[in-house]
Amino acid sequence: MTSDLDTVGRATATPDTDQPWRDLGLKGDEYERIREILGRRPSNSELAMYSVMWSEHCSYKSSKVHLRQFGEKAPETDALLVGIGENAGVVDIGDGLAVTFKVESHNHPSFVEPYQGAATGVGGIVRDIISMGARPVAIMDPLRFGPLDADDTRRVLPGIVAGISGYGNCLGLPNIGGEVVFDSCYAGNPLVNALALGVMKHEDIHLASAKGLGNKVILYGARTGGDGIGGVSVLASETFEDTGPAKRPAVQVGDPFMEKLLIECTLELLQAGLVEGIQDLGGAGISCATSELASNGDGGMDVALDLVPLRDPTLSPEEILMSESQERMCAVVTPDKVDEFLAVCEKWDVPATVIGEVTDTNRLRITWHGELIVDVPPRTVAHDGPVYNRPMARPVYLDALQANTPDSLPRPRSAAELQDTILDLVASPNQASKAWVTDQYDRYVRGNTVLAQPEDAGVIRVDEQTGRGVALSTDCNGRFAKLDPYAGAQLAYAEAYRNVAATGAVPLAVTNCLNFGSPEDPEVMWQFAEAVRGLADACQQMGTPVTGGNVSFYNSTGDTAIHPTPLVGVLGVFDDTDRRTPMSWGIDGELIYLLGTTEDEFGGSEWAHHQGHLGGLPPAVKLEAERQLGQILVAGSRDGMLTAAHDLSDGGVAIGLIEMALRSGTGARLWVPDGIDPFVFLLSESTARALVVVPRSEELRFTEMCGARGFPCTRIGVVDSGLGADLGRGEDQVVVIGNVYGEDLVLGLDEVRSAHSATLPAVLG
Amino acid sequence: MTSSPTSEGVSGARIGVVTFPGTLDDVDASRAVALAGAEPVTLWHGDADLRDVDAVVLPGGFSYGDYLRCGAIARFAPVMEPLVAAARGGLPVLGICNGFQILCETHLLPGALTRNESLHFVCRDQRLRVETADTFWTSDFEPGDEIVIPLKNGEGNYVADERVLDELEAENRVVFRYLGGNPNGSRRDIAGISNARGNVVGLMPHPEHAVEDLTGPGTDGLGLFTSALTAIVNA
């Protein structure tokens, strides 16, 4: 075997050897650049490292020039303790506490192997959180699939959900939110984004760097196997083709039990002060961890690769460098603390091995049984990858798409027609209950879950003494982004912001997961640039910094890119989670108010989508109104003026009302205000709106507050559990909407609930 | 470990909470013990030492990753040796979810927990009927009380042969039954059982997740922990 070893010496001696750079996902000019950096051809091990680290997934080579705006336009804030660029950003939430949160895509692995792809998506994002020194406390999974009844959806959805459930539940992390969206643009390319939230004290923040000459490099966690080789390069950074080799081996295989041990072990190591620098092994495995640790520290590292414990002893050094086997971490430890470090690992039954040490050579040198196989400047691997200013072009179809407004669609014109429309929508896959999915997730573990799906945002208590906590929501309407990516990204932001504020939390910081088609397509690149510009502008205007994010390109079905899907996560903070506002209303007589202004806006709406229509412009972005609405919702929560609140988005007032009624199990009487078309009032998706429920005793105080701020608030209904009896329906809970084309529109909650809850089980079993 | 309400430990009772590798709900169980007014005491799977506790909770989770079979490896942990002996001698022991599975594996309780009939993990707020108050862990309830506590498991389908099931019913050892739909296919809707003496109780739903209005569906779960406390203090 050793005789085949492509050492650095051999690479120098045989400059003309053909190398498989193309199969590893590199372009010709990138390969030339590597030769230029090294002054010779790379050894096969060096080639392996560069290929994974210079992949789109790891190097952000197509997105970097745009993502800079998140830093350049960052608002002035004291809230950010650690900014973009580390494993995850860290946000100050007061009282010496901080949280870190991040979302990442695992789209392609989940398509190839749904269970393991989704499971390891959870595992990877959780390791990002622990490598910042934080205890993971919650996860969320925004998911997007093709049509519910498509064959491929029935293949991938149950596996993806089972993977998230199997891995996340076994880690002991409550799953508190996320989304499940169906749209034909995701057929054959589901989006599996995974978010994790971690908590720490300010003084516990750890960063990935290898400092201190002579310090030891310790690899700990699972043994390295042959799974996930080239996951970031050949899998995450290319479009799928029907031909070509099977990509299943590029998917990693997860072991949540090991990850749970790794969490507890790592937190104990950090608490005991045994760690100088730490990095998780995710995409690009050992290549990434060693080159990043070295280039962020004193600049040099020696590693003996043959010391890496293996699951499969036949692995070659190139494979070990590229393997993305899960549940592994890398730490830099001073020599006097190595024994103590290893003892903690042994307590948790976690294998740990010293594989190298920090040097001052400015070189990352890796040996295999004593022979030098890698000798590179680590920065050139980790940070100096190629940067592309890819060509961009406004899509040629866009003018026609925007001109094709939903105005020509037939609208319901009577109470009966509108009732049918609403019942249809309630049962449509996107509006139907997602309990089939979320009931497979543990939302209770750790005992700090204050709100979880289907509430507007997940709310976690961070400090049990004071009740201090955070709210988190992720949102994106890809149809809006397709119609106008700049506005679409801002609308995603606005919805997440509104969801967080609806629970009573003050929105503070932002993360994102930007899912797009191929960056080599100028029209996709334009969508991407517009979305980034939109989100950066919104964050600047609203004073909420972007703390980090993730880009996933090459999401396409055949030649057709997915809708641009710039998923935005907003984090908000509570002084006391006891003040949270849920979405279910309380007792008879409480008053239902609509906050905000309703316009005739149906471009990209759920109603139009249900008719198979996509065209026109998305609803207007109203960031200043969102800010005012947020302030009202937070004040209402803080001063005890609200029983319930619910953000309005997909399906407008009608769907919002029904969700609140179903959640509370109590009926209500509503009326359509004069001067607005009932269809528009009930189903338009105008932004910066929410429904709130106010006890009678607080009505005056609340309406005066809205009046003083000049924010529109309209009384539209009252909670009433007795409407069933009035209509001769006994104890039935009923929502009655009056003034609908001169009639009452009557919705029995039992009927609505059956329609709402039957859709997913009918297809998924 | 977790926050302490003002009442913590006022009773002087000490209740141990065991952590195995892969245990998840130990923080929750400790919180519940503290809220009930006892002192939670951490017990480590690798130490054959019960630290003089007055009762023990085996919390939920995936001990040893549920590898081989739920609870099958945990029963061989060093802490289990003194625990099984003490339980046979009357020490109150509560097994929740994975803890129930471990108690069945040790044969402190009869039967076994198998894969849910739906083959899916299920998490929901579950209605239960308390069938008997004649155990150390339910003495603060009345028979027939209906409570709501979270249920979350993938392998909660209680099975035993007909003779054992008849015996459990005849001896008043079915402690909890599912109401409003059997979530996992358990025989005779059984959610929890006890040993003959009533000191060892196992159940699949999670009372430790229903101890605060803010974070649970209510506080119905607290009764199990206060019951044990009553038994300890009166002992």
Image (cartoon, coloured by chain):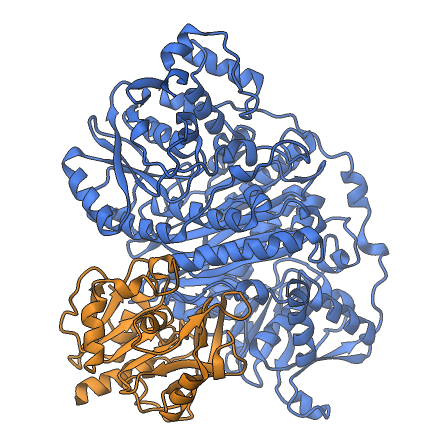
Residue A12 visible to the viewer: yes
Estimate the x, y position of residue A236 in percent, counting from the top left.
Answer: 55, 36
Left/right of residue A490 with respect to residue B1 in the rendered view: right
Nearest to the observer: residue A298 or residue A301: A301
Left/right of residue A123 with respect to residue B50 in the rendered view: right
Estimate the x, y position of residue A100 in percent, counting from the top left.
Answer: 39, 49
Q: Is residue A510 above or below residue A372?
A: below
- Choose top left, top right, bottom left or bottom right for residue B25: bottom left
Nearest to the observer: residue B81 or residue A177: B81
**Residue located 36% across and 70% down the image:** B101
**Residue located 38% across and 57% down the image:** B67
Estimate the x, y position of residue A287 in percent, counting from the top left.
Answer: 40, 29
Q: Chain A is drawn in which colour?
A: blue
Quadrant showing the N terminus of chain B? bottom left
- Choose top left, top right, bottom left or bottom right for residue A408: bottom right
Q: Chain B is drawn in which colour?
A: orange
Residue A92 visible to the viewer: no
Nearest to the observer: residue A246 or residue A584: A246
